[in-house]
Image (cartoon, rainbow, N blue to C red):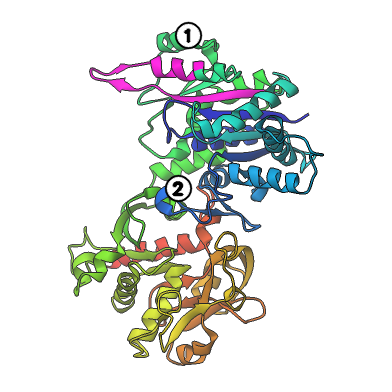
Amino acid sequence: MNKFIFISGGVCSSLGKGVAASSLGALLESRGLNVRMVKCDPYINVDAGTMSPYQHGEVYVTDDGAETDLDLGNYARFTGSPLSRANSVTTGQVYESVIRKEREGRFLGRCVQVIPHITDEIKSRILAVAREDPDNDVVIVEIGGTVGDIESIPFLEAARQLIHESGKANAISVHLTLIPEVAGGELKTKPTQHSVKAMQEMGIQPDVLICRAPVMLDEPTRRKIALFTNVESEAVFTSYDVDTTIYEIPIVFFDQKLDQVVLKKMGVESRHAKLAPWYSMMDRFAGRKGKVRIGIVGKYMELHDAYKSVYEALFHAGLECGVAVELVKIDSTRLEETDNPDSILGASSAAEARLDGILVPGGFGQRGINGMVKASAWARTNKVPYFGICLGMQIMVIDWGRHVLGWEDADSTEFDQDSKHPVISLLEEQVDVKNYGGTMRLGKSETVAEPGTHILAAYKEKNIWERHRHRYEFSNKYRKEMTESGLKTAAFTPDGSLVECVEWPDHPWGLGVQFHPEFKSKPTAASPLFRDFIAAARDARSCN
């Protein structure tokens, strides 16, 4: 029988349930168990695809084209668990499915209710992940939101039912709470006590508590929490603020024996843990020498999570290249407002303040686009390493059209329908699309790299599989003029019909790709393109 671990949160949001769930998954994998991860999101949106990055952070895309919550990115970076649309469950999906069944008459005229019909749908989706592979051992289910939120109640009730139906040896509850520090440095346990009480009122007695705190909890505090929450003191753990990286959290939990306690509660034999990759990664972190300053020129700069996977991939690349990566966040609208990009991007700045590379990530909409084009032109003319992702590649093409070919109105039809030189245009199959959710070019797709290109040097093989999320492409109408003027078309779809990568000639490293390589980067295996971009930035810094 599969084992289930339900991870919930209390007191407040953003305590790190996703990192805690991912870290526990990594520890169980290190002991030879096959783990599957599921995220239950209480929002009524069917998926995260149409949500503003300011509302919910980035959209993480799976191989099969699901647009999901960013926590699936954490699962992918920490674990080897395969992820698909089945691993993301939202209230919108659940109600959409139940209502469709009701319209089809599949409930035989019965009154359709939250219990049992909505909770049964939630359970069926969790069980489907458990049963998709006979070798699955443990399914870790993260329930979004906090206990007490009205939106989370159906998911917590489904968890209660599954724990009851599976038996305590096969399903346990892990609850993440906050231990705040008040004036004088005193840690307060009362919020955790109230949070556990709210769980108990839902019919769930937490088996394990993970307490988010600024420092490691001492033994008397753990005993006090255990006494007032009905949880054994050995099952009270601390997720304290590390001064290194979130990728140390699996080691922090391992040192506290979190995985051993969880396995004991589920009646699973505790096998030897193989954490060598994590310790090696931390050794690389400690051994970094020097830094590179990377300017991220984007349009959602106020919220760090809007480009979560990009920032993590840059960190991974820094680990592999032996340097710290300093992120310099630049709102592209600032560049639109200046006639001197140098004043912001700083080619003439002191060495310590100079940018060593420019990255333009994905995005949608016209705001800030001309600022991104200025950043591209600046990096191209100043020979500064440049990496364009999705929109960032399209920006390179627009820049080339405007400033090399002299087409002042070169643009994308996304931004200017009346441009006489629409060098970026809508995919043919997208022309008549009216619904925005889940209708782009999404998911894993093959790219074929050309000989003598940076992209081939990075991947070391010509057939590349990466994930896409876009509607617009390099317009083939202008391919001939672009390439004859020097722009390298460095990779294509297998049939050669679509350009997937462009590179600047006579430039140390100027490359843009239509796909999103950040989604497959891991702390133990950096994305090849991010690695080579940071290496180029490091080399550029050493030459200045």
- In the image, is residue 447 above or below residue 485? above
Q: Is residue 36 magenta?
A: no
Across and down, in percent, residue 24 comes to 57, 32
Residue at mark 1 to residue at mark 2: CA–CA distance:
34 Å
Across and down, in percent, residue 416 comes to 40, 79
Q: Is residue 182 magenta?
A: yes
Q: Quadrant of residue 487?
A: bottom left
Quadrant that contains the C terminus: bottom left
Q: Is residue 463 visible?
A: no
Task: Report the amino acid beneath label 1.
Answer: Phe
Q: Residue at the spot x=44%, y=69% of the render?
A: 391
Badge nearest the viewer, 1 or 2: 2
Across and down, in percent, residue 466 comes to 59, 63
* Secondary structure of residue under mark 1: helix
Between 257 and 97, the residue placed more toward the observer is 97
Which residue is disc 1 drawn over? 228
The segment highlighted magenta reads 171-197
Q: Point out which mark residue 56 bears.
A: 2
Across and down, in percent, residue 475 comes to 51, 83
Q: Residue at the spot x=54%, y=12% of the render?
A: 231
Q: Is residue 461 left or right of residue 176?
A: right
